[in-house]
Image: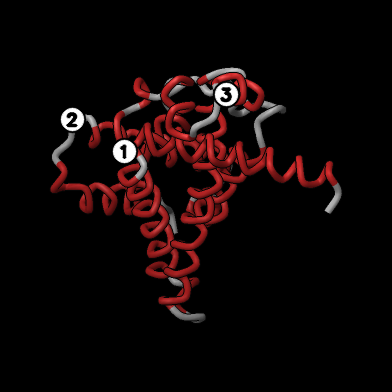
């Protein structure tokens, strides 16, 4: 390994540590607790070292958001694939099979938001300097949307543009996630809401 390659690897490892530490601190105490001073103390780097990787908290939030988007995409695809496998080859194309995949997708999305509130905030509530629905949208965010679209395009309904339907379904999931977390919706009815969302919006 050349000196340059070693330096690049060390730099990437420092960045991963900074992002992981910021994420851990945010999940423990909220994003207000994440400051460059506290991060420097936790990872035992100087603040100038942190600033050599990220210009400030906004960029760190953006890095956490991209990481979260990649994780969410993987979980959504995994949930859909698992539901398809459970349904079996013949049943996966049936009404029950398709709705099963959509239901699994919805549950996986809401579970992710519940398990990772600080990451979810970084993705959708806070300013991480990331562009959504634009030409310069990062690939991780595009892939997160694609993971929804891959399953939801099958239930958009005749004459409905799949991307537009996916936006509406995603908005519904986001509303359920944020309203439930804020205590605006009773937690006990979560499964019934998913069932209603799928049965009323998913056309098979």
Q: Earlier in the sequence, mark 3 or mark 1?
A: 3
- Residue 73 drawn at (x, y percent): 53, 50
Asked whether residue 67 appears in the rendered view, the answer is: yes
Q: Quadrant of residue 59?
A: top right
Give the quadrant of the N terminus.
bottom right
Q: Are marks 2 and 1 in contact (CB under 8 Å)?
A: no
Q: Quadrant of residue 51?
A: top right
Judge from the rendering whether residue 50 lies leftward or rightward of residue 178; answer left or right: right
Q: Are marks 3 and 1 in contact (CB under 8 Å)?
A: no
Q: CA distance from mark 3 to mark 1?
A: 25 Å
Task: Out of 137 and 93, give the one closest to the viewer.
Answer: 137
Judge from the rendering whether residue 194 lies leftward or rightward of residue 12; answer left or right: left
Task: Out of 94 and 195, give the one closest to the viewer.
Answer: 195
Q: Residues within 10 Å of mark 3 (few under 14, many from 20)?
A: some
**In front: mark 3 or mark 2?**
3
Which label was assigned to residue 184? Answer: 2
Q: Which residue is mark 3?
A: 59
Question: Residue drawn at (84%, 41%), measured in percent from left and top?
Answer: 4
Judging from the image, what secondary structure is the residue with disc 3 in?
Answer: helix
Task: Out of 133 and 20, give the one closest to the viewer.
Answer: 20
- Residue 95 drawn at (x, y percent): 41, 67
Judge from the rendering whether residue 155 lies leftward or rightward of residue 14; answer left or right: left
Q: CA distance from mark 2 to mark 1?
A: 10 Å
Which label was assigned to residue 177? Answer: 1
Question: Residue drawn at (52%, 58%), measured in percent from left and top?
Answer: 77
Question: Residue drawn at (44%, 40%), measured in percent from left and top?
Answer: 170
- Residue 153 drawn at (x, y percent): 55, 52
- Residue 18 drawn at (x, y percent): 53, 35
Q: Residues within 10 Å of mark 1 (few under 14, many from 20)?
A: many
**In front: mark 3 or mark 1?**
3
């Amino acid at each position: 390994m050349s000196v340059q390659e070693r330096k690049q690897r060390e730099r990437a490892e420092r960045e991963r540590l900074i992002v992981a530490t910021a994420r851990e601190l945010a999940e423990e105490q909220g994003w207000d607790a994440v400051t460059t001073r506290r991060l420097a103390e936790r990872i035992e780097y100087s603040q100038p070292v942190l600033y050599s990787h990220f210009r400030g908290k906004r960029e760190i939030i953006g890095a956490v958001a991209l990481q979260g988007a990649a994780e969410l995409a993987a979980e959504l695809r995994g949930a859909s694939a698992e539901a398809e496998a459970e349904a079996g080859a013949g049943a996966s194309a049936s009404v029950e099979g398709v709705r099963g995949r959509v239901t699994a997708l919805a549950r996986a999305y809401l579970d992710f938001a519940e398990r990772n509130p600080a990451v979810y905030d970084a993705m959708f509530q806070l300013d991480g300097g990331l562009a959504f629905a634009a030409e310069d949208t990062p690939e991780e965010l595009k892939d997160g949307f694609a993971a929804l679209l891959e399953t939801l395009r099958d239930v958009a309904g005749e004459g409905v543009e799949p991307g537009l339907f996916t936006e509406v379904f995603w908005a519904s999931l986001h509303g359920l996630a944020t309203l439930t977390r804020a205590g605006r919706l009773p937690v006990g009815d979560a499964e019934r809401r998913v069932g209603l969302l799928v049965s009323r919006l998913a056309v098979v």
